[in-house]
Each structure stands twice: as structure tokens, then as C-alpha cells.
Image (spheres, rainbow, N blue to C red):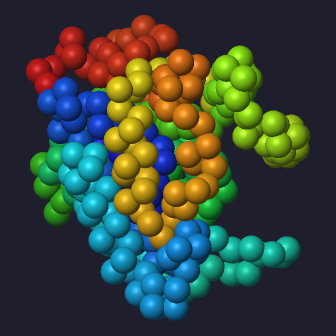
Amino acid sequence: MAVHAHPDDESSKGAATMARYVREGIDVMVCTMTGGERGDVLNPAMDRPEVKADMARIRREEMARAREILGVQQRFMGFVDSGLPEGDPKPPLPDGSFALVPLAEAVAPLVKAVREFRPHVILTYDENGGYPHPDHIKTHQVTVEAFEAAADPDRYPEAGEPWQPLKLYYFVSFHQAKYVALHEEMLRRGQDSPYEKIFAQWEERARKREELGIKQLEITTRIDVADYLEIRDQALLAHATQIDPKSAWFDCPLDVQRAAWPTEDYHLARSLVDTELPEDDLFAGVRESVTL
């Protein structure tokens, strides 16, 4: 089970991993906490008044296409996108936003989904949300709470029979080592690299993270997804309001990615089974304990 904040997050973080496991016969569920109603239109070709006026419906349709491409099951948890506040100071979040929902209320539908789907492994963001969007941070909080609450018969008794997931992972999707490797591989092939301009930004981000006491997550688990990167890209493109086909998402050729960094990467945050690090399988330790 992968728990995400908005439609499109599932296609930009861990999509190739899900595509691989689905094609290996594993049931995969995406739980999407909000409908992405307040998302901006990031693709100029879709930046039209009628699109902006109907974002809730359109983003659900985009999610349905991505879900079909990936081969996953998917549920919306029913909360409203908080939007990404901008400015200094930042404005208050709109009333009713997911990030403002009390934690116990926000956890309830996810506990129900966990008890019904009965996942052995759950994926989500770290405590900083991967990036500081209020819905991503809230998604982390909700998922960590649901991981524990779903197994407790005294909590959310109306949500079904208790179920204990065995492993909890955080995405480590956008990290410097990966982009340095891609950059160096493109130069080695005599190709222009799109990454030089972002390294200076990374240094500034690293400085700010250090000031805030935010540490880079250790990569404990690398999943080989070389054969599934094209499916990931197809799923991304299904979110047409969010993904510009001409954007930096697609600057690096797939053959370069396969050669330089063919994995999607994770941090094992919690495990109730014995496993040895580093791992190359999200089900390491689970396969030895249960029948999948």
C-alpha cells in the first residue's frame, strides 16, 4: 500500500516499483488522501479556464488513467487539498483543508483501508513530507498513526477487523547522489546534461535543511526498476494538468537512467520482521514470515 497526498504523487514517487510488483503478482493499493482540487495547472497546454473550473473532476479522471497504466488499485480517502501556501508570512490554510483535519479524524479512513486491503508493506513520505507541502506532512503523520492503529482492536472498532502491517518505508526519491550519477553518465556519453543548473540550488537547499536540522534519509532499500521506467513515465503523463511533456521530468533519456541509476530508493522506517540491510526487496523478511 502506498499512501499519497494528491493524484500524481503516486506516479512521481515509487511508480516503477509498484508497476514491477503488480507484474510479479503482488496486489498493490494506492490511497490518495485528497483530490488535488487546489493544485495549479502546471502544463501550459492544459492551462485553460474550463480546466481550472473543473479541477476536481479532471484530476480524478487523470488518476483513473494512471491507475490503469500502473495496474494498481486506488482509493480516495475523501479529504480536500490544502493547496500550497506562498508568501512571507504564509497565509492561513482554507477552512476544511486536509492539513487542518484533526489527526484522529484524518486517520480513520486510512485505518479502514488498511484493515480491508491488509497490506504487509506500507510506503509514504518522511516527517518532512519529502518537501514541505502541508498535505505531504499530514500524510506522513496519518500513515504512521494508521500503521499502529490498524492493529489495535480498541481503536477505530467500526473500521473492521484489526490488521498489522509488517514494514513501513519512506520514499527517498529526489536525492543528490542520483542526479550526480545521471549527470556524469550523460557527460560520459557526450550529451548535454540538464542537471548542472540544479546543483547550485541543491547546495542552498542542503544549507537550509541543515539549519532546520533536517537530515538526509539513509537509503536502506533499492528496488531495481530498470524495466518499468517507461510505465512510470506513461503514468506521469496521464496527469496532464500536472505534468508538461516538455518539462524536466523527461530531460534524461531512459537508457541513461537504466545505466546510471536503475533503482527507486527507500528508507526502512519500521519493521516487525527480521531483515538485513541493505535490501533489494520491499518484502525482504516478509516473504520468509508469511505467504504472499
Quadrant position of residue 93: bottom right
Residue most extreme to the top: 276
Whether residue 202 is visible, yes or no, is: no
Q: For the image shown, how many numbered marks are present on the structure? A: 0
Whether residue 46 is visible, yes or no, is: yes
Residue most extreme to the front: 190
In the image, 73 versus 123, the foreground residue is 73
Residue at 72 percent across and 23 percent down: it is: 190
Residue 26 shown left or right of residue 36 in the figure: left
Residue 65 shown left or right of residue 118 in the figure: right
In the rendered view, tell whether residue 157 sits above or below residue 172: below
Residue at 30 percent across and 22 percent down: it is: 283
In the rendered view, tell whether residue 101 sits above or below residue 132: below
**Which image quarter is the N terminus in?**
top left
**Which image quarter is the C terminus in?**
top left
Residue 243 shown left or right of residue 151 in the figure: right
In the image, 42 versus 39, the foreground residue is 42
Quadrant position of residue 156: bottom left
In the rendered view, tell whether residue 143 sits above or below residue 7: above
Q: Position of residue 14 (x, y in %)?
A: 43, 39
In the image, 159 versus 43, the foreground residue is 43
Residue at 17 percent across and 63 percent down: it is: 158
Residue at 52 percent across and 86 percent down: it is: 48
Q: Position of residue 23 (x, y in %)?
A: 20, 32
Q: Position of residue 174 (x, y in %)?
A: 62, 38
Residue 228 shown left or right of residue 247 in the figure: left
Q: Position of residue 261 (x, y in %)?
A: 55, 22
